[in-house]
Amino acid sequence: MGRISTHVLDVARGLPASGVEVVLVRRDEAGEVELARATTNADGRTDAPLAEGDALRAGVHEIRFEVGGYFADEGFLDIVPVRFRVDDPDGNYHVPLLCSPWAYSTYRGS
C-alpha cells in the first residue's frame, strides 16, 4: 500500500518545524483536488500520511508548505509548493522540506 508523507525541518534553528500547515493536492486536466490538510507536530511530521491506499493515484501531486506563519515576521518565504509525480501508487513518496526563513530544499526520501 503506497503513501505520501512529509516532514519539515527548520535548518536555521536546527529543529523540527512544528505547527506548519501543509496541503496536498492532486493535479490533472480538470484542475486540482485537495486530498489532505494537516499541521506538523513536535517532530515536524504530520500525525498520519497525507495520502495512502486508494486515495493515492498516479499523476501529478503538490504539497504546499505554509511556512509564512511558522517564520512569522522574520521570513521571506510564505508558501513553498513542491510539485512531484507519482508513477507507482503502491510506492512510498516521502517529501521532506528543509527550510529557513530565506531558502528551502527538498528530496524524495524513504
Image (cartoon, helix red, strand yellow):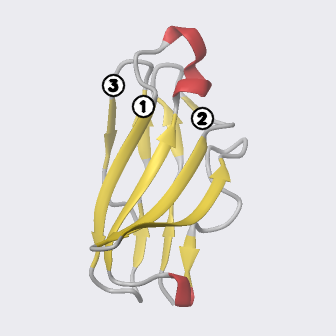
- The front one of 107 and 56 is 56
Q: Tell me the CA gap for discs 3 and 1.
A: 6 Å
The local crowd at label 3, few if under 14, some if 14 to 19, many if 20 or more residues have their Cα within 10 Å, is: few
Where does label 3 land, which residue? 103
The image shows residue 48, relative to residue 77, as above or below, that is below
Q: Are marks 3 and 1 in contact (CB under 8 Å)?
A: yes
Residue flagged by tag 1: what amino acid is it? Answer: Cys
The local crowd at label 1, few if under 14, some if 14 to 19, many if 20 or more residues have their Cα within 10 Å, is: many
* Local SS, label 3: loop
Q: Going by the image, does 79 lie left or right of 29? A: right
- Where residue 66 appears, as percent x and y from the top left, is 53, 37
Q: Going by the image, does 108 lie left or right of 26? A: left
Which numbered tag is attached to residue 17? 2
Q: Residue at x 51, y 90 (%)?
A: 1
Residue flagged by tag 3: what amino acid is it? Answer: Ala
- Where residue 16 appears, as percent x and y from the top left, is 59, 36
Q: Residue at x 54, y 53 (%)?
A: 23
- Where residue 15 appears, as percent x and y from the top left, is 58, 30
* Local SS, label 2: loop
Q: Tell me the CA gap for discs 2 and 1.
A: 9 Å
Q: Are marks 3 and 2 in contact (CB under 8 Å)?
A: no
* Local SS, label 1: strand
- Where residue 54 appears, as percent x and y from the top left, is 54, 90
Residue flagged by tag 2: what amino acid is it? Answer: Ala
User: Which comes sooner in the sequence, label 2 or label 1?
Assistant: 2
Q: Are marks 2 and 1 in contact (CB under 8 Å)?
A: yes
Where does label 1 land, which residue? 99
Q: Residue at x 40, y 16 (%)?
A: 76
